[in-house]
Image (cartoon, rainbow, N blue to C red):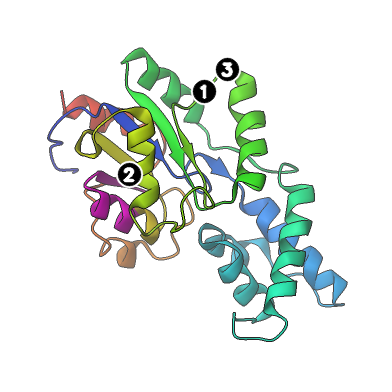
Amino acid sequence: MPQAVSRIPRAVLFDFDGTLVDSAPDLAGAINDLRAERALPAIPYETLRPYATYGARSLLRAGLDMTPDAAEYEPTRQRFLAIYETRKLHNTHLFDGVLELLIALERQQIAWGIVTNKHSRLAEPMIHELLRDRAFTPVTVVCGDTTPTPKPHPAPLLLAAQKAAIEPEHCWFVGDGESDVRASIAAGMKPVLATYGYVPDLAHARSWGAHHEIDQPLDLLDLVASAA
């Protein structure tokens, strides 16, 4: 059973990939497109999915066994990002319950925003199509290139809180990756682990230090209710 929550948040900040949106199908597809260019067979989606939360570096290692010290790493990374940019919304969708969760938060006058390590050229069009075009407008969006240091550094979360005009101690941060939990703790926010995302090893993830876990987006409402 989850422990009691200390107080209702004034704002809930969310990671994007693996928390609000299931983008793994297009990320895995981009890696397999890259493999196809090299006459390599496709890797099963289930194998690539857990790497989606960690971005291009992790996917290139899983898909091509390529690390940043490789001479061809940077041009390969740029090619991967170019492929992904063309297909980023082909099969990506909001997780079930996300829109209902955001409606409930807004009804309770709890602000919500997005803090992602995805660069703005990729993240912003996705946020527009999946959320803003449906009249869901975050109070703040901080992308991977908004601050000099992305998560797990706390700077993106602190900037998001500043933009929302809410003190960090009154914010919760929901994410599916270790960098999300670490950044939240460093920023003085309450970290919530989204286990429905791309968590590859839940037992290990529990060592990251998240205060709470949710198994689906709407579970967050139970945590908010228990803080009342």
Tell me where residue 125 sits by quadrant.
Answer: top right
Q: Is residue 21 left or right of residue 167?
A: right
Q: Are marks 2 and 3 in contact (CB under 8 Å)?
A: no
Q: Nearer the viewer, residue 48 or 75?
A: 75
Amino acid at dot 3: Ala
Q: Is residue 51 left or right of residue 1?
A: right
- Residue 204, compared with residue 221, is above or below; it is below
Residue drawn at the location 42% of the way across and 26% of the way down: 101
Q: Nearer the viewer, mark 2 or mark 1?
A: 2
Where residue 14 appears, x then y in whole percent? 42, 40
Where residue 161 appears, x then y in whole percent? 33, 36
Alpha-carbon span between mark 2 and mark 1: 19 Å
Tell me where residue 57 sits by quadrant.
Answer: bottom right
Q: Nearer the viewer, mark 2 or mark 3?
A: 2
Q: Secondary structure at mark 2?
A: helix
- Give the extent of the magenta segment: 181-193
Q: Is residue 1 left or right of residue 78?
A: left
| Residue position for label 2 | 158
